[in-house]
Every structure is written in C-alpha cells, then in structure tokens.
Image (spheres, rainbow, N blue to C red):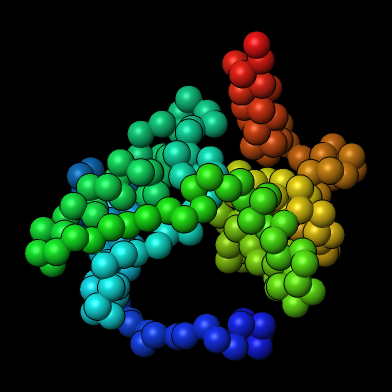
Amino acid sequence: MINKLYPNLQHKEQYVFPFRMERDYEDFGSKRESTQRTRAFLFMVAGGISALRCGGSQLEVYEAGIGVINAPLLPRMGGSKTTRSTHPEFLNKMSRLFSLIAQRDFKIVLPFACFTKGELVSSLKNHRDLEDLSRESFSCVCYPRRNTKKKICGKCFACVFRRIAMYSAGIKENLAEYEFDILCKQDWNRMKPVERRPLCCFLEQIYELGESTNP
C-alpha cells in the first residue's frame, strides 16, 4: 500500500539484528534486571548501525509531541518505569557516541517533535488507504492479548493516547477491536477503578497544564 501511494519512495536494504535475552533468572537471583532500561540503547544502536552502513550521517526517530519528553502521569511512574527512549538529552548523547565511533559527525533527530500525535494522524485523513491503514494500527501495552479475542484493551495508557489521537483526527474506528470503549458509559461502569486511572491521569494533566498556562 505504501509503495502504491508513494512510488518514488526508495527502500534501502533491510538489516536483521539478532540478540539474546537471558531467561535463566535463577543465575541472577535478587540482582536480576527486570526494568528493560537498556532497551532504548539497543534500538538506537541498531538504527545507528543501519544508517552508518548505508553511508548516512543521520538517524530519524519518529516520536511526536509529549511522547518525546514522556513526563510521568503518576508519581510511581518515575525512574525506570517511564521510558526516556526519545528524550532529546538521551538522543544527543547517543549522537555524540556514534560520532566518536564513526569518527565523523552523526546526528539522531526528531523531525516530528513539535507535532502532537493527533496532528500527525490527521495527515492520514486525506488519504483513504492510509486512513484505513491507521485503523489497523494498535498501541496496546498488553499486546499480544492471550485471554481475549479483542486486539486492543482500550484502557491502558497507550490505548488511551492512541484513542485521543484518532478521535482528534476525526478518524472513526472499529470499536469491535476494543475490549473496553472508554467513551461508552456501559463499558466505563464495568471497569475497575484502577482501570479508569489512565484516562483520568490524562484529564488531570490537561487540566494542570491549562491552569499553568492561563494568564
């Protein structure tokens, strides 16, 4: 579909990066690292190596808006529980590391840092095929979902963030894919209080930002 819409798009060689995750937890005991805090480092290394092998001097990372800073929505989400994989400071340090390794200037950039996710999704609405493709996307942190036939839980932070973007863009979704529709009173009532927290956190953040920016 992408090739059909953009016939001039040039595809480079695809690279495969096999890596091993240690599953023999007993060898580590209480010292076992479970936060995956080095995941972002692994992703940037894979991207940087790919760019350098193609002769490039720049790696583009497609995170947008508040996702770049990713301020914690809850106090307990601080530290390793809130990813900083696209934070400008981290990407700047990775850029310096690659520049030293390659012995030439190399930058990791965020071309959509000043756009909200809703603004980016809105750009798909003018293309019927891309709009249809957006409906097939998902951001659920619980994926793959093994205990239900529903592809998307609809209640986690990632699902709520995606739902806001799609709603903002005016793209009507197939709600049959959701286990919970947070905008449906019946589904809201059958959710546990803790399951309602992600949407409430977003609303609280919007209110606090509004209060802090009002003259």
Give residue 194's position: percent from left, percent from top.
65, 33
Drawn side of residue 11 relative to residue 134, left or right: left
Up the image or down, 90 lies above or below 174; here it is above
In the foreground, 37 or 68: 68
Does residue 143 appear in the picture of this structure?
yes
In the foreground, 196 or 30: 196
Task: Give me the residue at 48% from left, 33% from top.
Answer: 71
- Quarter holding the C terminus is top right
Give residue 13's position: percent from left, percent from top.
36, 87
Up the image or down, 212 lies above or below 85; here it is above
Task: Give me the residue at 34% from left, 64% from top.
Answer: 59
Based on the displayed image, in which of its 4 quarters is residue 134 positioned? bottom right
Task: Give me the residue at 24% from left, 53% from top.
Answer: 94
- Residue at the far top: name it: 215
Based on the displayed image, in which of its 4 quarters is residue 129 positioned? bottom right
Give residue 200's position: percent from left, percent from top.
69, 30
- The count of marks equals 0
In the foreground, 90 or 157: 90
Based on the displayed image, in which of its 4 quarters is residue 15 positioned? bottom left
Drawn side of residue 55 relative to residue 148, left or right: left
In the foreground, 182 or 113: 113
- Quarter holding the N terminus is bottom right
Drawn side of residue 207 relative to residue 25, left or right: right
Give residue 141's position: percent from left, percent from top.
56, 54
Drawn side of residue 186 relative to residue 81, left or right: right
Does residue 152 appear in the picture of this structure?
no
Task: Give me the residue at 35% from left, 39% from top.
Answer: 80
